[in-house]
Image: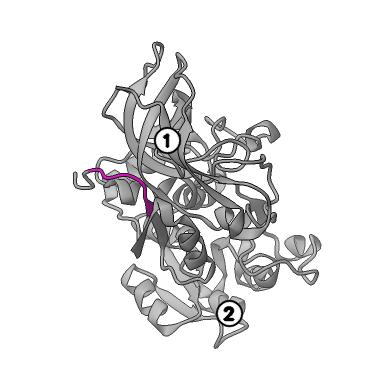
Amino acid sequence: MVPTTTKQWTVAGKDGFDSLKFHENAQLPKLGDHDVLVHFHYASLNYRDLIIPKGKYPFPTKENVIPGSDGAGTVEAVGARVTQFKPGDKVLTLFNQAHQAGPISLAIVGTGLGGAIDGALRQYASFDQTGLVHMPVTLDFKQGSTLPCAALTAWNALYGIESKALKPGETVLTQGTGGVSIFALQFAKVAGARVIATTSSDVKANTLRQLGADIVINYKDDPNWGETAKKASPHGLGVDHILEVGGPKTMTQSLKAAKPEGVISIIGFLGGMSKEQPSFLECLNHIVTVRGVLVGSRLQFEMMNEAIDANGIKPVVDEKVFALEDLKDAYQYMWDQKHFGKLTVKIDDAASKL
């Protein structure tokens, strides 16, 4: 029997986490000819999920949206004209549902899962078959659920500009221990690159070294970490790829660390907004390419998944797992920065073993 109802959360308003509303028996729409019905087992959270109910997300959102861009589950049923999936397949959600390949567009930005259109924090959901990808065969559902946003963002940052794609022997700078930064560290190491990582604690520094970071800088002890990173790069020439997650408060240091013709990929603004930030002329002064990255395409997702399987990459997942019904607690836990790596939500029982 194909289910007709689902447990789900919605975002009703912009009053913080109290805007999150739980629904026990929401109706599921009829499955269309090109639709795939997914039974979700795990979801993972991103900083973006936390700021949508606070009204601080800069991209399109709709009222009463079902939150969450990252879901992993099993295909429950397919429409009559679906050719890419069959019942029983293990699948992951695509962040921007219309971003199939090539450059992003304003129209594609309007298809963000869990923002502009209903997302993954529910038991069951139907998607057009082009809005899903097959899960890497070497991962379980909990691990797989961490890939749609953070991993793909890191992959796009390193490989999205083909002429400046990461090469063996180059240097990558990551900031902190969030999902994007850790995935970038993992991808860079299997590609034969050097990694300089920043963090705020000795405990996290040790973990970053265990994951393969060549050099770790404590930015609290060294506020001028950008120059330190540049000096630590081969011949002191600077860093080839920088994943900028802090925003205005860290951009000055990223510019100091960058190699001429290097790439700074702006991922987010975890450090908060600030009127004091570098001007566009600083990009010229440092001769760097600065780009904004909004996740990536389905084609990039499929390429990344092949690399994950081929290299045995395992996502770093926080040891604490929240139940779907406890989503507000999960949001608060992540907001308080108690997590390390990706934070997951268990939605429904499934065999997480391969």
**Nearer the camera: disc 1 or disc 2:** 1
Residue that carries the numbered disc 1 in the rendered image? 6
Please give the range of residues in magenta. 345-350
Give the quadrant of residue 188: bottom left
Colouring scheme, one of rainbow, by chain, secondary structure, one colour: one colour
Residue 71 vs residue 307, the one in the foreground: 71
| On-image quarter of the N terminus | top left
- Which is nearer the N-term, disc 1 or disc 2? 1
Dot 1: element: strand
Is 144 drawn above or below residue 77 in the view shown? below
Amino acid residing under circle 2: Trp
Tell me the chief SS of the magenta region. loop
Residue appearing at x 35%, y 74% in the figure? 207
Answer yes or no: is residue 168 visible. no
Report the front residue among 72 and 221: 72
* Residue 141 image label: none
Q: Is residue 313 left or right of residue 152?
A: left
Residue type indicated by callout 1? Thr
Q: Quadrant of residue 117?
A: top right
> Depth check: 274 or 255 in front?
274
Q: Position of residue 296 (x, y in %)?
A: 53, 41
Q: Which mark is residue 225?
A: 2
